[in-house]
Image (cartoon, rainbow, N blue to C red):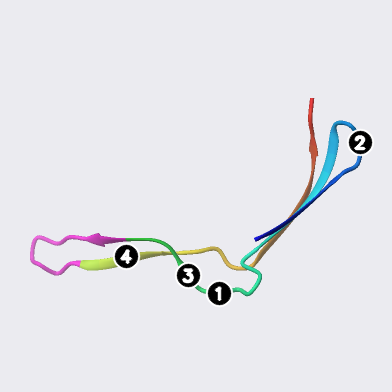
Amino acid sequence: MTQIDYTTGTNTSEFLDARNQTNERYATAANTAYDARGNDSANFYPGDAINVTNGVAFRF
């Protein structure tokens, strides 16, 4: 994760946030679903793909 902040005024700043820059596949969480018949299965929740966000923040 990379985050760049730039303060443009006393109450204003701009930001750029980049995540998963190499676009790796990964699981954010895992659990097991239990079945009464004994057919348990693993569940994996995939992580986010490459993402870049920019914006402006105002503070009051």
Residue 11 percent across, percent down from the top left: 85, 31
In this rendering, which labeled residue sits more in front, label 3 or label 4? 3
Would you name the residue on which mark 4 appears? 43
Decide which of tag 1 and tag 2 comes sooner along the chain: 2
Residue 25 percent across, percent down from the top left: 51, 73
| Amino acid at circle 2 | Gly
Queried whether the magenta region covers residue 36, the answer comes back as: yes
**Mark 3 touches mark 1? (CB < 8 Å):** yes
Q: What stretch is highlighted in magenta?
A: 31-40
Numbered circle sitting on residue 9: 2
Residue 22 percent across, percent down from the top left: 63, 74
Would you name the residue on which mark 1 appears? 24
Give the CA distance from mark 2 to mark 3. Answer: 39 Å
Decide which of tag 2 and tag 3 comes sooner along the chain: 2
Label 2 packing within 10 angstroms: few (<14), some (14-19), many (20+): few
Instruction: Determine the residue located farthest toward the left in the rendered image.
Output: 37
Question: Looking at the image, is 39 positioned above or below residue 9?
Answer: below
Give the CA distance from mark 4 to mark 2. Answer: 47 Å
| Amino acid at circle 1 | Glu
Give the CA distance from mark 3 to mark 1. Answer: 6 Å
